[in-house]
Image (tube, rainbow, N blue to C red):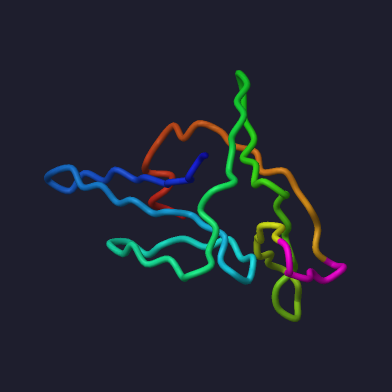
């Protein structure tokens, strides 16, 4: 079983660690806990994740796949979902493979 935990180390006079847990919410949406909170809604899915690696990149895999759906009227953004039983997706949604890579600088995360 693999749980996805994102970590960011920030130096502000001392080390501080922020841990965020990523989960699939009951509606299928890929979600995460807020900083300093462990709240995860009942019915959310924490397991079913795996990761593969190669020399240059890897893949983040959710058990039955990941799906991206266009958001808003202009459809310029996308929301990511885990493919879970009982959730219907619009035909405009697309299945995809998530590619992972090594983070070379924490400062890149701070700008996102």
In the orientation shown, which residue stands out farthest toward the left? 13
Q: Where is residue 13 drawn, in percent x and y? A: 12, 46
In this picture, is 39 found above or below 62? below
Q: Which residue is drawn at 32% across and 61% down?
A: 35
Outermost residue, top side: 55
Q: Quadrant of residue 50?
A: top right
Question: Is residue 63 in the magenta section?
Answer: no
Pick the residue in front: 20 or 42.
42
Residue 20, x across and y down, in percent? 39, 54
Quarter-wise, where is residue 55 in the image? Answer: top right
Can you name the residue that lies furthest to the right here?
Answer: 91
Residue nearest the viewer, comparing 19 with 49? 49
Please, is residue 108 above or below residue 21 in the view? above
* Residue closer to the observer: 43 or 17: 43
Q: Main secondary structure of the magenta part?
A: loop
Q: Which is nearer the eye, 8 or 106?
A: 8
Image mark count? 0
Determine which quarter of the picture holds residue 78: bottom right
Image-based side of 15 in relation to 103, left or right: left
- The question of residue 87 being in magenta is answered with yes
- Say left or right for 24 vs 77: left
Residue 36 location, x and y as percent?
27, 62
* Residue at x 43%, y 44% (from the top left corner): 108
Residue at screen point 21% across, 47% down? 16
Classify 10 as above or below 82: above
Q: Percent from the top left, x then y, of residue 98?
A: 66, 43
Residues in magenta, as a range: 85-92
Say if 27 sits above or below 111 in the image.
below
């Amino acid at each position: 079983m693999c749980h996805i935990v994102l970590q960011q180390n920030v130096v502000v006079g001392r080390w501080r660690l922020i841990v965020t847990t990523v989960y699939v919410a009951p509606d299928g949406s890929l979600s995460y806990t807020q900083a300093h909170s462990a709240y995860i809604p009942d019915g959310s899915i924490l397991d079913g994740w795996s990761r593969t690696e190669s020399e240059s990149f890897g893949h983040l895999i959710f058990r039955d796949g990941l799906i991206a759906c266009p958001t808003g009227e202009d459809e310029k953004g996308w929301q990511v979902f885990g493919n879970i039983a009982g959730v219907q997706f619009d035909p405009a949604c697309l299945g995809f493979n998530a590619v992972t890579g090594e983070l070379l600088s924490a400062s890149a995360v701070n700008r996102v």
